[in-house]
Amino acid sequence: MRRTSLIALLVSFLFSVFVYANGAISRNIDKETFIYSNKDGISLKLDKYRLRKSEEKQACIIFLFGGSFRGGTRDGDGFLKYYDFLANRGYTVLAIDYRLGLKDLRDPVPEKVIPALENAIYMAVEDLYDATNYALQQASSWRIDPEKIIITGSSAGAIAVLQAEYECNRQSAISKKLPAGFRYAGIIGFAGAIFSQGEMKWTGKAAPMLFFHGDMDATVPFFKLEIAGMQFCGSQAIAEQLKVAGSPYCLYQVSGSKHEISSKPMKDNLPEIQRFISLFVENKQPLMIHSVIDTIGKRSDVIPLTPEDFIRNNFK
């Protein structure tokens, strides 16, 4: 009997390891799906991941997938380990749909790309704000802390969450979709940037931010890209502005890496992500950190991204 029980326990353990290693959600996490908005004939959904039978009030983390505003899904296999890790550590995770504003773009020349990209970014920001409002409305029944809502995203999703915080900081017209006085508790961007007409300017302190970005990224600029009179300000440019504004941030510059940093930290840097949430969001540490991480076997000289690179890599 003991031998049988031991074998059953071992099989169960090995199965759970296999499931986790392959990116699936572990069995102690509940997943529920909701429609948070209907726009342009599309039902926008979110998946809620939460530790089973957890009754305490939790911080809420809203995630936006990447895909150049042309594709992607909220439940892609590459994200599930990230959701599982966060939910198992006591955070309620909301993985959301958003409208893909570049899905039908044809003839990607600069004079067409820039207005289309600007429109796509603001569509995603608007949808993120709507999902945030939906979460706030459900805060009591979902047992989430409305003062601890963190937004995070990969690539295009990272652009959307950074832009969302920038619009809140400037109190722009689109940010009025959120309740008066509401602010996000933290921002986590995997290879993101901010779109700016003219110089990017922060008005006072922003929410604490965590950036992961490869400094040879030819899809989303690490520094600043000027194209057709507009500025696309990457993680380095944003961090420089946050430092001037006295806003807490942590930037991981991955030397010699490209756009793979839009996804790798969700597998390889989970302890750093949790540390950011603990130090910067929960304990409100006023830190400013810029870490340069070497990528073994890759070149470390930084080549500036050109408008041609940007269009080629995003609109092949």
Image (cartoon, rainbow, N blue to C red):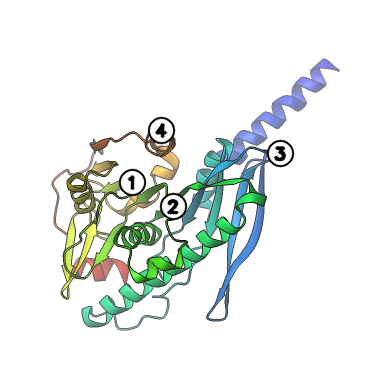
* Relative depth, front residue between 228 and 104: 228
Quarter of the image where one finds residue 14: top right
Q: Look at discs 4 and 1 and give the one toward the viewer.
A: 4
Q: Which mark is residue 283?
A: 4
User: Label 3 belongs to which residue?
Assistant: 53
Left or right: residue 273 versus residue 288 is right
Left or right: residue 127 versus residue 53 is left
Left or right: residue 267 versus residue 302 is right
Q: Earlier in the sequence, mark 4 or mark 3?
A: 3
User: Label 1 belongs to which residue?
Assistant: 209
**Tag 1: residue type?**
Met
Number of on-image labels = 4
In percent of width and height, residue 231 lies at 19, 66
Q: Against 130, is 301 above or below?
A: above
**Tag 3: residue type?**
Lys
User: Label 2 belongs to which residue?
Assistant: 151
Q: Secondary structure at mark 2?
A: strand
- List the single residue furthest toward the front: 180
Quarter of the image where one finds residue 316: bottom left
* Relative depth, front residue between 45 and 20: 45
Q: CA distance from mark 1 to mark 2?
A: 10 Å
Q: Secondary structure at mark 3?
A: loop
- Does residue 71 appear in this view? no
- List the single residue furthest toward the right: 1
Q: Secondary structure at mark 1?
A: strand
